[in-house]
Image (cartoon, rainbow, N blue to C red):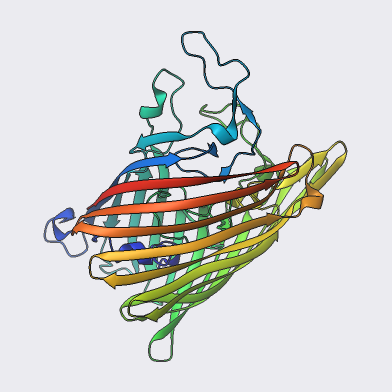
Amino acid sequence: MPRPALAIAGALLASWIAAPSAAAQTPAGDDPTGPVFTFYGTVVANTSAATTQLFIPDIPLWAVADGTRLQPPPIGGQTVPGGLDASEVGDVHMTARQTRLGLRVQFGAGSSSWTPSAQVEMDFFGARPNAGHGAVFNQPRMRLALITLRHTSGWSIVAGQDWAIFAPLNPASFSHFAVPLGAASGNPWMRLPQLRAERSVAVGDSARLLVQAGILRPLGGGDATAAGSLADLPSLSGERSGQPFYEGRVALTGTRHGRAQALGASVHYGREAVEPETLSTWGAAVDLQLVLHSKATLSGEAWTGSNLDTFQAGVIQGVSIAGSRIEAIDARGGWVQLALLPAPLWTLHAGAGIDDPETDGLSAAIARTRNRIVWGNAMYRLHPQVTAALQYTHFDTEYRTGAGSGHFGSLAIVFAF
């Protein structure tokens, strides 16, 4: 079954990172219908630096407004008098928490008309313990956990946590590997529990038409009151709506010069119970991955919608509540990236993204009015399994009462197996 939400989004990286080796694929005995296990992973060591305070310093989403006073944690019970200006805070980070591990299990069809497989994937971008030196005690986080059933008729059914159907592409980056580059700045994304059906049929000699439709967990509207507990109580506004999210996508897919390309259109719709009202969440997106030349690929997305903070769109702002006035925040945006292959061991990427929420719908507490980024990275393959990647990203964030900007640089050493 084609899995465009992963295969297309990672097509550029896939040309770099070696696929799991044959040694990692372990058949169970000689039974052709028995399971084949594939263990894979990407160990990512990042070193980064920023010139100003950025939101999530080691994997930033936007720039904190100039003039914002920050109070660092106390040292030995002592605090910095008056705090620090965000524009004067430069920092350096080193982390391996974007490391990723996964397992695929594939069965043969045997006498059945269904061929089952499953995939589980995790990284270490989960919550950090509230303890001294917690920044280096990174906890596991589930990324993917899904079951796929392929039928001989060409239909496939997917159940479990996977990438959302809506706006499935992501830019290529190792500085933003756990959270996709462009999140909150033009690239809507999320991985959600879902049940979907899809089919890919041949169109002409080389192209295929992919149709996907599914229901997804209606995640949205704030955070659970008991973070880290075994139960999320009470239910969030998406779950309280009493219905799932609905998503679909149609795409024309194919290959050129041995690399994947696609032109797709996707939609998202759901409801959120924001008492005493129920608001819609909706989005429409087009995505493109076009192989321009054997050494050049253009990719990107453009989207519009309302109340899309679940997908980190609207600069992660979905609903504005001011007294008795409750409004969904409309937003639009997109991103574009050019990939170049100038030499066998090199890949270069350059891109830009923008997220532009409607400022009229923002309350005093919802204040980010626009977020833009520009990036460039160079990836060099030191070994079939080892890549070095250097990236520069510029953040430009506008607020109701000010603005912030900052430079961010990252060096990643990556081992893939």
* Residue in view at x 42 percent, y 76 percent: 261
* Residue 375 % position (x, y): 47, 57
Direction left: furthest residue: 30
Query: Relative to residue 370, is residue 98 depicted above or below?
Result: above
Image quadrant of residue 156?
Answer: bottom left
| Quadrant (top left/top right/bottom left/bottom right) for the N terminus | bottom left
Q: Can residue 85 be spotted in the picture?
A: yes
Task: Return the residue nearer the eye: 329 or 403.
Answer: 403
* Residue 327 % position (x, y): 80, 48
Query: Relative to residue 329, is residue 80 depicted above or below?
Result: above
Q: Total of numbered circles in the picture?
A: 0
Task: Return the residue nearer the eye: 327 or 273.
Answer: 327
Relative to 102, 332 lies left or right: right
Direction front: furthest residue: 88
Relative to 232, 156 lies left or right: left
Relative to 32, 274 lies left or right: right
Task: Return the residue nearer the eye: 101 or 389.
Answer: 389
* Residue 222 % position (x, y): 65, 38
Query: Relative to residue 307, is residue 305 depicted above or below?
Result: below
* Residue in view at x 34 percent, y 59 percent: 378
Direction bottom: furthest residue: 204
* Residue 348 % position (x, y): 36, 64
Relative to 76, 285 lies left or right: right
* Residue in view at x 46 percent, y 8 percent: 76
Direction top: furthest residue: 77
* Residue in view at x 68 percent, y 48 percent: 398
Image quadrant of residue 342?
Answer: bottom left
Q: Can residue 180 be spotted in the picture?
A: no
